[in-house]
Amino acid sequence: MSQEQFTRNLLQIKDQNIKNFRVSDKSRDALRIYADLSYNLSVCPRCGKHEIVKNGFKTVNIRIPNISERTALLILRKQRFLCKHCGHTKMAQTTVVEGQHQISRNVLHGITGSLTEDRTMASIASQYNVSTNTVSRQLAVLGKQTQPAYNGLPASLCIDEFRSTGNQMSFIAIDAQKHDLVTILPGRKNKEIKEFFLNHYDLKNREKVTQIVMDFNSQYQSIIHAIFPNTVIIADNFHLVQMTLRSLNQTRVQVMKNFPKDTPEYRIFKYYWRLYLMSYEDLEKSKTQWFSHLKDHYTQEQLVSKGLSLSEVLTRTYFSAHDLVEAIRNRDYPAFIKALGEVENVSPQLLTTIKTFIHKKQFIKNMTTCSLSNGPIEGVNRKIKQIKRTAYGYRNWTNFHYRIQIEFNIRVQKRGPIRK
Ligand SMILES: [Zn+2]
């Protein structure tokens, strides 16, 4: 291997037209690598005549990736060409850097890679010794490339909301099956959501959506059919379970408050709340354990039974709630209807939840005929939270949006070229 090729390999420069490498290590700040870019150009790109001559050099400074933690600059003398026929001038081109840019493709590539990681823009800028503006420009370039194509909608969508810039609530939609991000919108108002879908997707596209999973209490129900005429609404079963258990929990707290603090009756509710959220079948019935706040050994079943024996309403609420939860978890609609039918004298909290269930039981029925849930969106929301935390919050919606898109499109990029 020649010395030149060795240097090229070391600097990760693929362009064979860059030659005559010299390194200057005089200054304390940056490592300067001098080189020449030249090749023969025979045809004028403008007039097509073979009258091109070489016409001096122009020197440009290009930021290349750090070498052993030192900032590195490629000081490149670029060959200039002149067409004697038409007067056209041209500068030699290289794959190292784009046109007039001063930051090499390798550096930009590194920045791009870093943007897909959980890192702040400032830390990326400092690693590559560029300004945060450069990083944010790269973010915009990449953000635009990873913008979803508005030509297809999946058959099933999960929709929800999340806390975005400032304290604003924003809308999110993902593909319920592939978990790809479909869109995030700054606001969550029905008007905004409707306008977005009507402006970006034609009717034929929107008609493809046949299932939408959503939070039971969300306000979107009123606009969904105007946007997606063929869809059914599917209640998110996690949310249904959550609603039911929350009512049960509220009931426990209310019963607890009937007893003075520092009584065993109070403590049996106060400290062992988790056990009441377990179904009776799941409670340990033979092995005892030490309950330090009661200073005694019980089985889990004994403890819950002791608690339930203190309130009839709580007992009925406990069993009804767990029957409902089990039916919902198993997506068993007949069992759900049966559980509803057996509800009697339960707490007002559970009753409120049950009234909502009855009012929207079609959505629950739809849930029982498929396996979809908003579970995947929870994962997405967690990731978004992490992006926000790393950046100490984003004030700028566009940058925030780009970063989310980029982090979510990693999978797409790894599979192949970015979808345009
Ligand atoms: Zn020419």
Image (cartoon, rainbow, N blue to C red):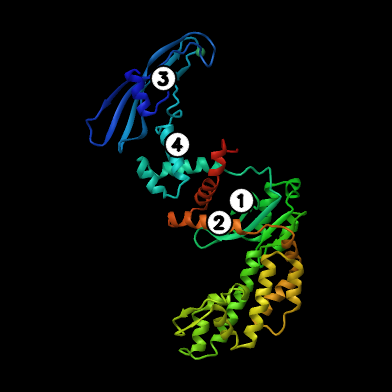
Whichever of labels 2 and 4 marks the residue nearer the N terminus, that label is 4
Q: Disc 3 marks which residue?
A: 16
Question: Who's the residue at 76% across and 49% down the image?
Answer: 207
Q: Which secondary structure, mark 4?
A: helix
- For the residues labelled 3 and 4, the Cα–Cα distance comes to 20 Å
- Judging depth in this view, the residue of 210 and 177 nearest the camera is 177
Q: Disc 2 marks which residue?
A: 379
395 over 342 or under it: above or below: above
Q: Disc 4 marks which residue?
A: 109
Q: Is the residue under label 2 in contact with that under label 1 (CB below 8 Å)?
A: yes
Whichever of labels 1 and 4 marks the residue nearer the N terminus, that label is 4
Q: Quadrant of the C terminus?
A: top right
Question: Who's the residue at 63% across and 42% down the image?
Answer: 149
Could you tell me if residue 171 is visible in this image?
Answer: no
- For the residues labelled 1 and 3, the Cα–Cα distance comes to 44 Å
- The percent coordinates of residue 199 (x first, y second) are 68, 48
Q: Is the residue under label 4 in contact with that under label 3 (CB below 8 Å)?
A: no
Q: Is residue 299 left or right of residue 11?
A: right
Q: Nearer the viewer, mark 1 or mark 3?
A: 1
Question: Who's the residue at 68% across and 51% down the image?
Answer: 197
- Judging depth in this view, the residue of 83 and 92 nearest the camera is 92
Q: Is the residue under label 3 in contact with that under label 1 (CB below 8 Å)?
A: no
